[in-house]
Amino acid sequence: MILWELKKILTGKIALLLIMALGINLFIFYYTESLETQENPYFTPQNYRSVFAEMENLNTSERVSFLKNKIDVIQEKINDPENGYDENLYDEKDFLNELYEEALFIQNYEDFLTDSEENALKKTSVSIFGEKGSFAYNNALKMAEDFQSLHGTPVSFDKTHGITAATGLFTGDIITVFILLLIVGELLIKEHQQGIMPVIRTTKKGRKQVILAKIFAVLIMCFILSIIFLSVNLLYSAVVYGLGDLSRPVQSLPGFAASTVKINIWQYFILLWIVKAFAFFIVASIAIVFSVIFANGIAAYGLTGIILAINYVLYFVIPVTSPIAQLHFLNLGNFLSGTSLFCGEVNLNIFSVPMDVLTISLIIMAVLALVLPIISVLIFVKSKKEKGKLKILSHLPSPRRKKYSSGIFCYECFKLFVSNGAIIIFAVFITVQFLSYPKKDTLTAYEQCEISYMETLKGEYTEEKLNYLQSEYEENAALSNDNFTARTKAYSIESKLLPLAYHLQELEAQGENAEFVPYSGYAYLFNPDSKTASASACFLILFIAISVTSLFPMEKATGMNQILTTTLKGKGKTVSTKVKTCLMLSVIMCILAFAPDFIYCLKMYGFENLMSQSQNLMVLSESFISLPIMVYMIILYLIRLLGVIGLTVIILGISSLLKSQIISVLLNLAIFGAPAILSMIDFKSLDNFSMVSILSANKLFFNNLQLILSLVGIIILTALGAVLLKKSQKTC
């Protein structure tokens, strides 16, 4: 029976979906690694492999010396005034410094263990940690024992970036979860909706044996999917970066220095595969429980999604140092990640007893992996279904529906997210946006210098502040040849601060209210040439076009639209509900598209002087309009939102006239997707004709004609889409 259930999975659309998912996963892997190159242009796979090729026959100590010598040579070139300022040298130095710090840590690993052990023991003599029997005291002793046990571990420095990139990429995790949800739907929900399940349940082995076969089939698929995605990621990393010596202890990897698990990297891969597989099985088991209870895709997927969302929010929001860190470590987000379970840096307080995260997690996962299937089996065997729900649920009072819209809305949501596959597209979109979040968590020396000066200068512009900047520049420029700090200050003042001061001087001369405003976050957010905003807009256009465009043609191709016209409110209500459902999805995507940059700026720089005029910012000095910064920001995001609404309505309007899903997708991609992609690859002539300029919106405030045309364009697109939908509503 298990083989039969596996055959149903692997011979259906799931197999094709898996192939597509692997392609998407590899694309996102490539995309995230390209972001690394954008942060440091010198960090490329070729340069990474080249450095290690030069160190191929060297041991760890010799590699440390080799890297130090290369850094010293580059520093001499930087200090040579004849070379001038060369950004490439700084990028290469940063790249080599990162490798050098990693190699130096490995070389001094024994010192790290000794210091960590001594620090842990010292805590036992401090009053707040010294109470015997307390968690703090026991934890300090356990940490000391853990570090002591690691002495003599033969760590070595070798290629690590490919390993950390492959095991740290969670794209495959999210895609696997959604594939498993579809598998559960294929095995349970679909069979119930087709009327097969009630027939199966009347047979001799139609209860316990059937549900057990389905559960074991899902378990096997969890192991298959886990090893496929992990292997593909590792294979890609091996080809692009190399994996180094896999017989090294896992403590050789960055972030694993305190791991108490004495295994090599090969064994780490195997354990990671098993842990991920069981984590996937837990998620699938949750979906199975809800599927057995409700026999309804929306309820099963929705409740499982809510549980996953709560877990991921706790995982990303709660810091590891929080008093409630248990909620960070002991949840599905951490289990699905898998890597942090082996780091061994934290012990959790379990009834005043310190226990490492891996042990507790394995216990919890084992319990869940056993209990959840048992619950599913008991419910499936003992329950009696009536009209798609359990008998025990049928006795609960159900509120009368005064309107039909809620039922239609749920039905349209199911078609959009499940039948139309938008749930997979939405998952990929979320993953792309999360990975697009800038990885830089520290400010550069130039940014720190600019922020420091702005703290001194902020407030009303005065001639004294201009004179102060000029004197600071002259003083630091004179010392710049021999002093890196002075060179940094001189460059920052000359390139950023003095131009800003001269701009404010002009504003004051024109009678405007001129003031210094800390600009770093605003410069990132409002930059008219921002690649991140344009990329987010381009992704948004593509994902909206793909996810909503086949909703109408799907019904026309199957003849369902003719059936709907015979039902009560089946003509107008279904069309309007489709539009509302798609608009809901598009608005959520719009928020997710531009949230990473906003959160990054808020976290890294903060937003000050929100009521100051926008023209006080150098990035908006050429703008034809001057508004309070807060008002400017609200209008910017409002235009983006209106653009998304107009885009969604016109795509739905066009697709409502077509019967072929393929033609509908290709046509909308040709009209909206192709210009967006071309404008992204430097076809500047398309900037004013693609939706990218409207959805990124930053450029609109520098040309009043372009702003007017864009707003008129949004109105025309929305109106035209509404007319086409109205026509479809009449002919539905």
Image: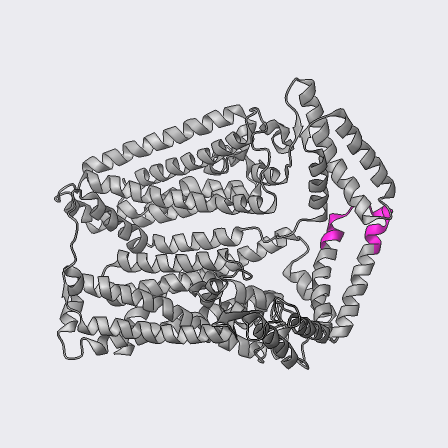
Residue 60: which quarter of the image? bottom right
Magenta residues (range): 76-91
Observer-nearest residue: 503 or 239? Answer: 503
Count of numbered tags: 0
- Residue 194 visible to an observer of this rendering: no
Q: Is residue 339 above or below residue 724?
A: below
Q: Determine whether, in the image, residue 66 is placed left or right of residue 444.
A: right
Q: How is the image coloured?
A: one colour
- Residue 313 visible to an observer of this rendering: yes
Identify the main secondary structure in magenta.
helix
Residue at the (56%, 47%) spot, across then down: 600
For the C terminus, the image quarter is: top left
Observer-nearest residue: 186 or 596? Answer: 596
Residue 30 percent across, percent down from the top left: 54, 58
Q: Determine whether, in the image, residue 295 is placed left or right of residue 447.
A: left
Q: Is residue 646 above or below residue 257?
A: above
Is 325 covered by the magenta stretch?
no
Residue 645 percent across, percent down from the top left: 38, 37
Q: Is residue 521 above or below residue 188?
A: above
